[in-house]
Image (cartoon, rainbow, N blue to C red):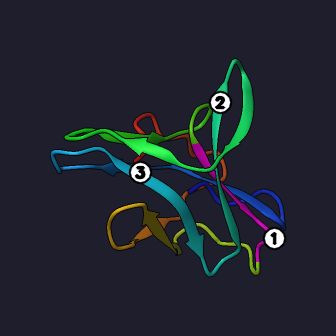
């Protein structure tokens, strides 16, 4: 996650890996830092996604300019060097908690990590 440049909004990037033999569906992401929505870019326009597929033995990459997380109504502004805890919710499995490091405001991951 790049350090937010806004007091109320931030973006989040990560890679979700599915080591299982069946497709997983990410249905939501939650965090104590604020409201989180999933967005994807379709025909150069950003739109909110209700669910996103993680292919069997594959990855779902959240990155700048593509599929990404939007953190809104931030309760506090994460600072570089901190971590933000997010919980990934799936249709057919238990939630997974991930710690996202906060990077510089200009950080743009090439692989979504």
x, y (%) of residue 38?
A: 62, 51
Q: Element under label 1?
A: loop
> Mark 2 near mark 3, Cβ–Cβ under 8 Å?
no
Give the left or right position of residue 52, taking residue 12 as reference: left
Instruction: Choose mark 2 or mark 3, whichever is in front.
Output: 3
Say which label, 1 or 3, has the lower sequence index.
3
| Residue denoted by label 3 | 25
| Residue denoted by label 1 | 73
Q: Of residues 57 and 70, which is closer to you in this image?
A: 57
Q: Element under label 2?
A: strand
Q: CA distance from mark 2 to mark 3?
A: 18 Å
Q: Of residues 61 and 82, which is closer to you in this image?
A: 61
Say if the magenta span includes residue 10.
no
Q: Of residues 103 and 46, which is closer to you in this image?
A: 46
x, y (%) of residue 12?
A: 58, 54
Instruction: Choose mark 2 or mark 1, whichever is in front.
Output: 2
Indicate which disc residue 28 carries. Answer: none
Indicate which disc residue 41 carries. Answer: 2
x, y (%) of residue 106?
A: 64, 45
Q: Residues within 10 Å of mark 2 (few under 14, many from 20)?
A: some
Give the left or right position of residue 73, taking residue 44 as reference: right
Q: CA distance from mark 2 to mark 1?
A: 22 Å
Q: Residue at x 76, y 80 (%)?
A: 75
Range of magenta residues: 68-74
Say which label, 2 or 1, has the lower sequence index.
2
Q: Residues within 10 Å of mark 3 (few under 14, many from 20)?
A: some
Q: Of residues 33 and 101, which is closer to you in this image?
A: 33
Say which label, 2 or 3, has the lower sequence index.
3
Instruction: Choose mark 1 or mark 3, whichever is in front.
Output: 3
């Amino acid at each position: 996650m790049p350090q937010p440049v806004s007091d109320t909004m931030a973006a989040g990037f990560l890679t979700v890996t599915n080591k299982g033999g069946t497709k997983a569906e990410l249905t939501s992401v939650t965090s104590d830092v604020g409201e989180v929505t999933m967005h994807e870019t379709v025909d150069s326009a950003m739109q909110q996604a209700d669910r996103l597929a993680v292919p069997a033995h594959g990855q779902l990459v959240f990155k700048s300019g593509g599929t990404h997380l939007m953190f809104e109504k931030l309760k506090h502004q994460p600072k570089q060097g901190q971590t933000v805890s997010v919980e990934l919710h799936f249709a057919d499995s238990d939630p997974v908690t991930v710690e996202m490091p906060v990077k510089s405001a200009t950080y743009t991951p090439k692989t979504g990590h």
